Structure formats: structure tokens, C-alpha cells
Amino acid sequence: MRALIIVAGGTGSRMNAELPKQLLPIHQKPIIVHSIEKFVAFDASMQIIISLHSDYFNLFEQIKNTYNLSVQVVSGGDTRFHSVQNALAVLHDEVNIVGVHDAARPLVSLQTIENTFSAAEKLGAAIPVIDMNESLREVENNTSKAVDRTKYKTVQTPQCFKKNILIGAYETPYNPLFTDDASVVEKNGYKIFLTEGNIENIKITYPQDLRWAEMLLHAST
């Protein structure tokens, strides 16, 4: 059985909005609903857990009812790391593969989801990535130098893992260098395998991202 943790913490400060970005509407639905519905389309039987700041529980309950969402909600932590920890505590016993997804990535493709869950089932730990398409420079001590962009990838979600690997990794003490789940699992000694993501799978962070996501969603319908 598969499970999905959707991390929906944070605030709407960068969006110039009172609500967290995940609850803002695009293409007639809150961003998080687009994300949830994509995974339900992939596997309607998976356990879906939303890690959300408790201030928004009541609002999200209304969203659940409006869109008939069968999901479980847990309180988000002070960091992404702690939000995932809270969600791991309520996984069903029969779950064997767990994906972790950013709520603000509503444009993940079914193929990206399939690629990553399938790789995790075979290899233990997998994340979707895309190639860098811009020049990169490394900055240090007020100087910079060009680097080979073919050696770097942009990381997306969902990041998928065998359940025992992810739970074991999250018993590690918190480190501020943990920027995603792969970095936590890698710290625990596991190899991270890369799968092909989709370029539309952007993380909505700034107001212009909302406009771009709106256009992409409109084009896909």
C-alpha cells in the first residue's frame, strides 16, 4: 500500500496574501486541492496525510467537505522536517511506500508520480529531477566562477521511499541543512536514485508563479 504526505505548512507572506499559498485559489480550486486530486487519480487507495498549521484546520475542513477529499490532517511542525515527522506517526501499518510532496506543486504529472513511486519500490529511495537549463556560477568570498551545469539537477517532489527507510531516517536529530526528505535519508546512509520529473512541476512561491500555474492548468484542460 502507498501513502502520501503533503507538506502544507508555511505562510502567505511572499504571496502578499493572508492565507498560506497552498490554500490560495488557482483555476477555480485551492492549490492544495489540485495537488491532492492528482495523486488520487494515480492511486485512489493510497493513504493521504496533510501536514498543516493548526491555525488553518477549520478552513481546510471546509475545503475537504467542498471537494469531498478523503484525507487525514495532522498539525505541521516548526520546520518541514518536523511536519513530516508528525505525519509519519499516523501512517497505516500496511503502508510500504511513502511519498512526500509539496502542497504548492499542483502541476506534477501522473508520469512523474509513477516514475518516482515505481523507482522507490524497486530501489528504496527516489526523487524526480529535471536538467538545469541556465548557466550557473558558484559564489564564495565575494568572488564567483562558472560551473558545469550538466553536473547539477533541479529537485522536485514527490520524493518517495520505502516506509522503513523514511521512518528510520526521521529518527535522526534535526539539522538545519535538511532541505528536503532526500537529504535526511541520504544522511542516514542511503543512496538516492533519480527519476525524470516534469518541467511544469514548479513550486509556487511568488505571485508570478500563480499566474504561470494558472496558464498551465488552463492549457491542460
Image (tube, helix red, strand yellow):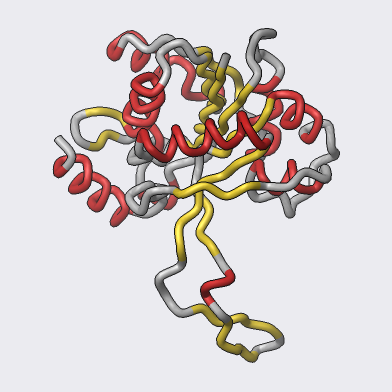
Q: Residue furthest front?
A: 122
How many numbered dots are placed on residues in this image? 0
Q: Is residue 28 above or below residue 63?
A: below
Q: Quadrant of residue 68?
A: top left
Q: Residue at x 38, y 47 (%)?
A: 201
Q: Position of residue 145 (x, y in %)?
A: 60, 89
Q: On the rendered structure, is 93 left or right of 172?
A: left
Q: Quadrant of residue 37?
A: top left
Q: Position of residue 144 (x, y in %)?
A: 60, 88
Q: In front here: 136 or 139?
A: 136
Q: Residue at x 34, y 17 (%)?
A: 63
Q: In front here: 87 or 3?
A: 3
Q: Is residue 187 above or below residue 147?
A: above
Q: Is residue 101 above or below residue 75?
A: below
Split into 4 quadrants, where in the image is the N terminus? Answer: top right
Split into 4 quadrants, where in the image is the C terminus? Answer: top left
Q: Position of residue 142 (x, y in %)?
A: 65, 89
Q: On the rendered structure, is 11 left or right of 1?
A: left
Q: On the rendered structure, is 54 left or right of 25?
A: right
Q: Residue at x 51, y 18 (%)?
A: 48
Q: Residue at x 68, y 23 (%)?
A: 86
